[in-house]
Amino acid sequence: GENVEQHPSTLSVQEGDSAVIKCTYSDSASNYFPWYKQELGKRPQLIIDIRSNVGEKKDQRIAVTLNKTAKHFSLHITETQPEDSAVYFCAASINGRDDKIIFGKGTRLHILP
Amino acid sequence: DTAVSQTPKYLVTQMGNDKSIKCEQNLGHDTMYWYKQDSKKFLKIMFSYNNKELIINETVPNRFSPKSPDKAHLNLHINSLELGDSAVYFCASSQGRGRGYTFGSGTRLTVV
């Protein structure tokens, strides 16, 4: 079955700097890659997603890139702000099968003042 | 008008008890899920129902039994609770076809 690896497990960046979280997946049939943000004590919330027919997607300060050949995908947050502090999860899914989403183990992002 | 609602939000119970968690979604989604989030924040899928039909049943002890009376509801019943069942349980729903989930607010289960 699908396996999603996520790095780093913890990331501290100075406010205003950029943060990058990287993930790899194992099943080449995966074609949908969502990213979730979970603030302390809250539910995971979808912040951005990308499909396998697209190499890059941007939404304001957040961007995702996908390299299907290498089975890598990454989340980039620019101009980080205190409210970006949270746990971020990458995930992979196969559209058209059971839509089961397999999550990475999460990255705890700390934005330092 | 919460999209995916779970009850209760907190549940503290003794080992050996039986408990249920309820989930309801008003998004008109066809597919609902149960995920377990352990103390290390790892989100692991347990079950999925599509329009009342069980489609995913991961390696979960058979003390856990999901029930979907209709496509808007997915409940989780747990028998003979053990200490290791302590976790946050999230319900989620999806329209499927490669779209993301909407999660409920979670149920923090503590077994003592």
Image: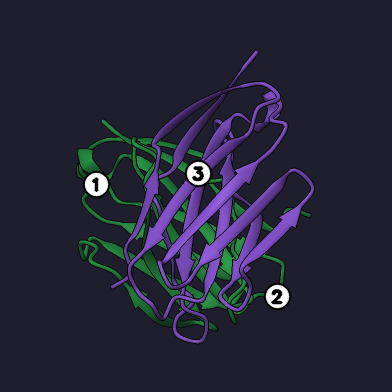
Chain colours: A purple, B green
Label of residue B44 in the image: none
Residues at badges 2 and 3 in contact (C-beta under 8 Å)? no
Determine the CA span between mark 1 and mark 2: 32 Å
Of mark 1 and mark 2, the one earlier in the sequence is 2
| Same chain assignment for discs 1 and 2 | yes
Residue shown at 43%/43% (left/top)? Answer: A106
* Towards the viewer: B11 or B47: B47
Q: Is residue A43 visible?
A: no
User: Which chain does the numbered disc 2 sit on?
Assistant: B
Describe the element under mark 1 as helix, strand or loop: loop
Describe the element under mark 3 as helix, strand or loop: strand
Label of residue B81 in the image: 1
User: Which chain does the numbered disc 3 sit on?
Assistant: A
Q: Nearer the viewer, mark 1 or mark 2?
A: 2
Image position of B22 with respect to A43: above or below: below
Image position of A95 with respect to B6: above or below: below
Q: Say which amino acid is labelled 2.
A: Gly
Which residue is tagged 2? B28
Provide residue B87's location: percent of width, then percent of height.
36, 41
Provide residue A22's location: percent of width, then percent of height.
46, 49
Residue shown at 73%/56% (left/top)? Answer: A58
Residue density around tag 1, few if under 14, some if 14–19, many if 20 or more, within 10 Å: many
